[in-house]
Image (tube, coloured by chain):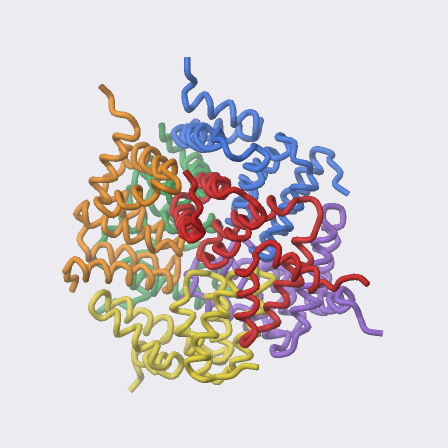
Chain colours: A purple, B yellow, C red, D blue, E orange, F green
Amino acid sequence: MEKTRFERGMEQLKSIDGLGGEKVIESLEDISPDLGRYIVEFAFGDIYTRNGLNLQERELITITSLLTAGGCEPQLAVHINGALNVKIPPQKIIETFLQCIPYTGFPKVLNAVFVAKKIFKEKGLRIL
Amino acid sequence: MEKTRFERGMEQLKSIDGLGGEKVIESLEDISPDLGRYIVEFAFGDIYTRNGLNLQERELITITSLLTAGGCEPQLAVHINGALNVKIPPQKIIETFLQCIPYTGFPKVLNAVFVAKKIFKEKGLRIL
Amino acid sequence: MEKTRFERGMEQLKSIDGLGGEKVIESLEDISPDLGRYIVEFAFGDIYTRNGLNLQERELITITSLLTAGGCEPQLAVHINGALNVKIPPQKIIETFLQCIPYTGFPKVLNAVFVAKKIFKEKGLRIL
Amino acid sequence: MEKTRFERGMEQLKSIDGLGGEKVIESLEDISPDLGRYIVEFAFGDIYTRNGLNLQERELITITSLLTAGGCEPQLAVHINGALNVKIPPQKIIETFLQCIPYTGFPKVLNAVFVAKKIFKEKGLRIL
Amino acid sequence: MEKTRFERGMEQLKSIDGLGGEKVIESLEDISPDLGRYIVEFAFGDIYTRNGLNLQERELITITSLLTAGGCEPQLAVHINGALNVKIPPQKIIETFLQCIPYTGFPKVLNAVFVAKKIFKEKGLRIL
Amino acid sequence: MEKTRFERGMEQLKSIDGLGGEKVIESLEDISPDLGRYIVEFAFGDIYTRNGLNLQERELITITSLLTAGGCEPQLAVHINGALNVKIPPQKIIETFLQCIPYTGFPKVLNAVFVAKKIFKEKGLRIL
């Protein structure tokens, strides 16, 4: 039997964002479960499961977009963890942020790097 | 003899953005040649020549950042051409834009897709 | 038989954005039909058909968000037409834009008002 | 005797944003009382007192604009309280945020929903 | 007799933005004269007439804010003209834009420089 | 012997942002020393040392750009300190923020004023 969009999305969410992603969905249960459902069905079930880009590429794009948007530090934290979960090395996450300097300027890159620094430290990851 | 930052940057600029990039630099000559120089030296000489990401990845990051920033259609056009120059298939450029929907919403993605559509048409590229 | 998300969305899109909305979807057919499908299924099929806000309220929210985002003039044009289609009077559209001044400043409000001015003129709508 | 812009604005501010709004103005007294005065006179005295939209509609527009701008969580908190003060039901505030998903993407909507969740909890408001 | 806010603002608007500013106000007359009035009364009557910064400094701040916001090219054009009207040399306008590179990245600076280039050319101003 | 870009930049950084700036560079040492180096070399060595604007003007431009971008409170704090270091009076910093109201709206100005309020208080600076 074919999986529903929600089932496909939940699988993707778990394999990419792991516990961090599931916690976001759970924290919506008493305020807007539909928002959680749309994230699972649309962002993960429809978009992340598409062909044409692998998961590593999708996560690089996601963290770039979140850095550039600004003010999305909580989501950036979830997806830096997601990037690590899909085996992007910590150094490559930082390199992605540096590539944004000419297009976004230094402040947003600094904000993103400091979010990553905190996460890498919590996980005991050494980058240099 | 070691190349200067400007020389390295100009090589990168030409190999990535081709004529479109050179035209931007030339169009600055009578208004702010220093701005052109900084783009060549810093964006291309310092950042694009770094290790840790290949040119295809750097262009995916660049077009994602330009889409998310909004209002950067001229630069997006230069770098969609740049993405094609470094052999990213047209379909993968569109796929990169679609990955941004959950993070930026539809309007910015539509703007980027229509810039790409115009470029692909001018080049006679078929995507579907 | 229950309508699909696409069918529900297409109905909504037609009743709100009319020809302007359909043209956007058609213009995506040779570059990214999936993008058009997501707009229909998700934006119109999932979100616009929800309870809790009427269509007039949804269009006021949409044009406010597009004004505030900036750089979304084509989408703003589609939804100013949409607002007129769901019977929001022209004066109320302008009033919505004025309410944004304290939160976004004058330039974005000016941009939106000039998009509306052009549309009202084309339709022969007098506002004062 | 006709009320001054400041008097009209202060009345509006109190009736809409209540204590939260007054606290913002007070907190400006030792750093920039003129900024507080402009908020009262212009935002509340000039704009909020206009005809053409009722207060509920004005608050829906305001929270939409603040969500879309991003990085305005303190002001969003003041105006979520304001929305409740003018009798917008909690569920309708959340519904307004969901309507923004297609236009702003999920991260900004999540940020706004979590600001609302905190406020609703403090007030003992149940939404589901 | 003391001048009204509108009279003070109109004087400021004319002395700073000249014809360009007046045209914006006029173009609002058949769509939202109140918006024009608020620009004159509040932006020019209240803010531009304050002490603490001279007009040159106010215009540098204004063009910086417009560059950084993005998507405000029409307003940027008005205020580049305004900057020239209050005797800021063309070279200093460009220098202001270059100072923004580290904080906003190259694309927004390029957009602003090209708006200035067009204006300087129309006025026969040579910058180098 | 001519100073390197890094040496010139480090001098500028110290004279402008003082300890706050140095701390940012140090905090990057174990996560992305290259990012720190680019800030020193490019932002301070290349841009801040240019002719055509004095340091006071450069700091006014910088805090304006950071206020307008939004979400850059940590960098705004560094540069409010920088503005004080180059002898811009506290009142003029606040005045710069007020000049942004018509272009960015009140929320971003409020955010910036509250960052300044905290810094002025820590330094025992009275503004009124």
**Residue drawn at x 45%, y 27% as measured from the top left:** D45
Q: Nearer the viewer, residue E33 or F87?
A: E33
Does residue A95 show up? Answer: no
Name the residue located 42 percent from the left edge and 61 percent from the top edge.
Answer: B71
Toward the viewer: A6 or F24? A6
Expressed as whole percent of the image width and height from the top left, the position of residue D16 reads 57, 29
Residue F99 position (above or below residue A72): above
Looking at this view, name the residue that lies furthest to the top: D1
The reply, left or right, for residue D30 in relation to residue E61 is right
Q: Nearer the viewer, residue A104 or B110?
A: B110
Q: Residue at x 55, y 52 (%)?
A: C82
Relative placement, left or right, of C29 versus B40 is right
- Which residue occupies the foreground of this view, B60 or E98? B60
In this rendering, the count of numbered labels is 0
Residue C40 in the figure: left or right of residue F80: right
Q: Residue E53, percent across and down?
A: 26, 38
Q: Residue furthest front?
A: C124
Q: Quadrant of residue E109?
A: bottom left
| Residue F55 showing in the rendered view | yes
Residue D87: x percent and y percent?
Answer: 65, 31
Quadrant of the frame with the N terminus of chain D: top left
Q: Residue at x 31, y 50 (%)?
A: E63
Q: Is residue C109 above or below residue F5?
A: above
Quarter of the image with the C terminus of chain D in it: top right
Tell me where residue B8 sits by quadrant: bottom left
Give the quarter of the image for residue F80.
top left
For this orientation, the residue located farthest to the bottom is B1
Q: Position of residue A34 (x, y in %)?
A: 73, 53
